[in-house]
Amino acid sequence: MAVNDKQRRYLKGLAHPLKPVVMIGNAGLTENVLAEIENALAYHELIKVRVSGQEKADRKQMLDEIAEKTGADLVMVIGHIGGLYRPADKPVIQLPG
């Protein structure tokens, strides 16, 4: 499910006070890291991921790859932090129309 601009702004506001739940270091995007992101998305719906040790273009590419592999929407990228949203089976976050 792709979110529209209004929903993206709403989710960005919700994500702002959150702390990153997954940190990606110099080892990059491994299967274990991807599994942890999947678990976090299933539990929280909206998470932040910190990508360290990469250039700006590489960070954006990695966050896009995470979003593609997990079926999540990349709702924000600020510096080393990316916000991902994927609705749960029983969504807790109610998106505006």
Image (cartoon, rainbow, N blue to C red):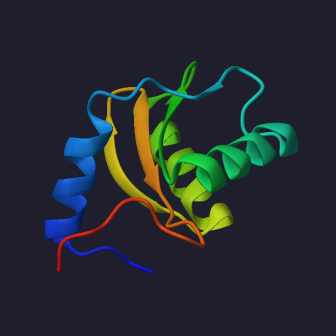
Q: Quadrant of the N terminus?
A: bottom left
Residue at horizontal 75 percent and vertical 40 percent from the top: 36
Front-most of residues 7 and 25: 7
Horizontally, residue 69 falls left or right of residue 10, namely right
Residue at horizontal 31 percent and vertical 66 percent from the top: 94
Q: Return the x and y of residue 58 as percentages of the image width and height.
A: 52, 39
Front-most of residues 33 and 59: 33
Q: Return the x and y of residue 19 as percentages of the image width and height.
A: 43, 23
> Above or below — where is 86 with respect to 61?
below
> Above or below — where is 38 with respect to 36?
below
Q: Return the x and y of residue 97 as percentages of the image width and height.
A: 17, 80
Q: Return the x and y of residue 31 as percentages of the image width and height.
A: 85, 45
In the figure, residue 10 lies in which quadrant? bottom left
Front-most of residues 72 and 44: 44
Horizontally, residue 25 falls left or right of residue 75, namely right
> Above or below — where is 9 with respect to 27?
below
Front-most of residues 12 and 60: 12
Residue at horizontal 78 percent and vertical 25 percent from the top: 27
Horizontally, residue 7 falls left or right of residue 68, namely left
Residue at horizontal 32 percent and vertical 73 percent from the top: 3
The residue sitting at the right extreme is 31
